[in-house]
Image (tube, grey):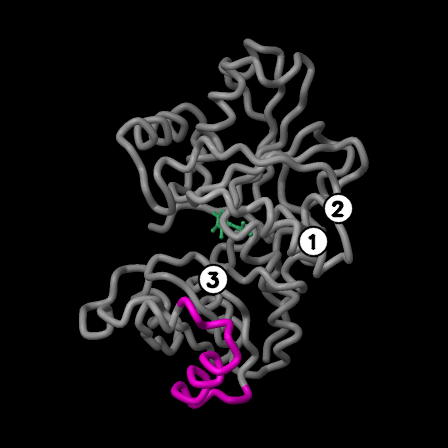
Amino acid sequence: MTSLDALHPRLPSPLQELVDDRFARSGVRLLLKRDDLIHPDLIGNKWRKLAPNLTAAAGRTVLTFGGAYSNHLRATAAAGRLLGLPTIGVVRGQELAGRPLNPSLARCAADGMRLHFVDRSTYRRKTEPDTQAAILRATDAEDAYVVPEGGSNDRAVHGCQGLGAELRGHADLVALACGTGGTLAGLAAGLASGQRVLGIPVLKGGFLTDDISALQHRAFGGPQGTWTLDDRFHFGGYARTTPELESFAADFEQRHGVPVERLYVAKLLYGLVTLAAEGAFPRGTTIAAVITGRPFP
Ligand SMILES: *Cc1c(COP(=O)(O)O)cnc(C)c1O
């Protein structure tokens, strides 16, 4: 297996100031933490979360889970190709099995990932020992190293502490979009005291506060850092969008020449612009917005 260092990640990731009058107007400084530039294929928080797991896998087959458009599946598949590791992706939706692959899954397959489709009820029960054992048997991967959906296990959370450490002393508030919340759980633990974190959930449901607390409890033994969530910017749920969000993202790209990933980053930036307009940030605040990924071509 090739070592992770051989992939030359760009770490610490760049921190860039962005001049935008929607923030300047309220006396707020906006920095972009460009985790999207860490590695061309192992992008953003996916690098931070996967790296410690790939090390722990020590050459074994890596098996993980995701939906048909999962960034996590794509990053795992890319890692497999780059490191010479076999990977298996367990995909939600038996009905997808007989159809042509969407571009995201086609990329996974091209990177050598073996795809295994399961029906939605099996997928929901995937963390139950019996169901997981059956999946491992069915994929002939009983000795595989299993990474949970979204990649957010203890090792991943510890990996994201590094993101916080890189931002120590650079911002009053660090903002990021959240899926499983694993990145936030680690980031908050890595910051200095006095720095705050704002999470923008992209899924609908309001369960994330408990999930993040549980992730921190498991990884660190208790709560870490100062963080809050603002649940107003999910736009209906995962992968849901509106013409307003789409035109916001396109306009942001045009103003700043920064590619805006649509599932997460667009909702984060929209949320921050809205909050700035509402006067939610005191004058003199420096915000670091974490660019956790980039658009899939
Ligand atoms: C996966 C992903 C996230 C979500 O990270 P979590 O740790 O699951 O909260 C955020 N942004 C992008 C671009 C992602 O691909």
In the picture of the structure, the residue carrying the numbered disc 2 is 224
The reply to whether the C-beta atoms of the residues labelled 1 and 2 are less than 8 Å apart is yes
In the image, taking residue 95 as reference, residue 207 lies left or right, namely right
Q: Nearer the viewer, residue 270 or 258?
A: 270
- Quickly name the residue at label 1: 216
Q: Which residue is mark 3?
A: 75
Above or below, 153 against 233 in this view is: below
Quick one: SS at disc 2?
loop
Sequence order check: which comes first, mark 1 or mark 3?
3
Residue 11, image x and y in percent? Answer: 66, 51
Circle 3: residue type: Ala
> For residue 260, which quarter of the picture?
top left
Q: Residues within 10 Å of mark 3 (few under 14, many from 20)?
A: many
Of pointers 2 and 3, the one earlier in the residue sequence:
3
Question: Is disc 1 surrounded by few (<14), some (14 to 19) or many (20+) residues within 10 Å?
Answer: many
The structure residue drawn at horizontal position 37% and vertical position 73%, both measured from the top left corner, is 122
Q: Is mark 3 within 8 Å of ligand 1?
A: yes
Q: Residue at x 48, y 83 (%)?
A: 130
- Identity, as a three-letter code, of the amino acid under mark 1: Gln
Q: Residues under labels 1 and 2: Cα distance?
A: 7 Å
Q: Which residues are magenta?
A: 124-143
Q: Nearer the viewer, mark 1 or mark 3?
A: 1
Give the secondary structure at mark 3: helix
Q: In which quadrant of the rendered image does the N terminus lie?
A: bottom right
**Marks 1 and 3, how far apart in space?**
24 Å
Q: Is residue 24 above or below residue 7?
A: above
